[in-house]
Image (spheres, helix red, strand yellow):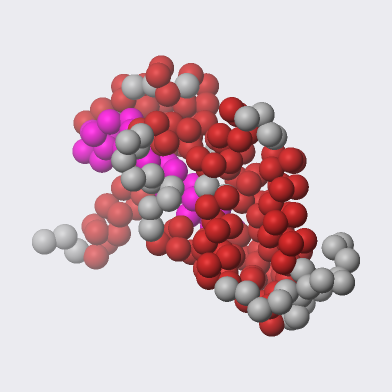
Amino acid sequence: MENKNETEAKESRDSEYRRRILDAARKLLEQNGPDNVNMYQIAQEAGIGQGTLYRRYNHPGEIYGDLMRTSLQRFLDELEAFRDRMVSAGSASALEGLYELIVRSLQYIDDNAELLALIRCMYAGKKSLILSKTPMMQRLHDLLKSQLELAERNGETPPIDPAGTAGFLLAVLTPEQYLYYRDTAALGKDRYLAGIRRLFIDGLRIRGEKPQ
């Protein structure tokens, strides 16, 4: 039976291997594209043996999925911390705070477009990884909902359904939706954001209040 020190050492080693594997996979994906990356290259870039790699992942798709989940987890942590700072600072407008959350979310999609597109192709014909009811997607929904509730309490909006509105907003912020309009319809991020602002920010303001 392993003692505490051995268990901690194993967990630390596993964590370090995982970090190196994910860093290597992202670097190779950005340099070569998904069609030109294999398990051998990932192991070489990470500086580990192929046996070590295969004990953790069966193929590059599993690595990309883990990479996406890790990236999204980090982003949501940062987004929640940003929202908490806005609330603590007593930001004047909850709706403007909501818009800033939207801007940051769309920028995240832009920054991870290649990886998101790859994940989308991997799960084509299946329930979308991004749209599935994962705890991380629930976190984003709850974050948007809480900001809408704050806007309603502050009197910035008429009575609304915060949960339903957050659901509609989340649908607009899915990578599938945004990347289609950015790449296929050539809408562009600025125009896409302008449309979201008209619908979910300016459109929710109580009549008579001038948009900032």
Residue positioned most to the front: 207
Q: Is residue 122 above or below residue 162?
A: above
User: Is 5 one of the magenta-colored residues?
Assistant: no
Number of marks in the image? 0
Is residue 52 in sight in this rendering? Answer: no
Give the percent coordinates (x, y) of residue 206: 78, 73
Horizontal side, residue 77 vs residue 151: left or right: left
Give the percent coordinates (x, y) of residue 186: 66, 29
Give the percent coordinates (x, y) of residue 80: 59, 65
Q: Nearer the viewer, residue 112 or 176?
A: 176
Residue positioned most to the left: 1
Is residue 120 in sight in this rendering? Answer: yes
Q: Residue at x 52, y 26 (%)?
A: 30
Give the percent coordinates (x, y) of residue 26: 47, 33
Prevailing SS of the magenta stretch: helix
Horizontal side, residue 179 vs residue 124: left or right: right
Q: Quadrant of the C terminus?
A: bottom right
Horizontal side, residue 197 vs residue 168: left or right: right
The image quarter containing residue 181 is top right
Q: Is residue 102 above or below residue 38?
A: below
The residue stretch that appears in magenta:
53-78
User: Is 65 one of the magenta-colored residues?
Assistant: yes
Q: Nearer the viewer, residue 23 or 167?
A: 167
Q: Quadrant of the N terminus?
A: bottom left
Q: Residue at x 31, y 47 (%)?
A: 14
Q: Nearer the viewer, residue 118 or 149?
A: 149
Q: Residue at x 24, y 57 (%)?
A: 6
Q: Residue at x 42, y 23 (%)?
A: 34
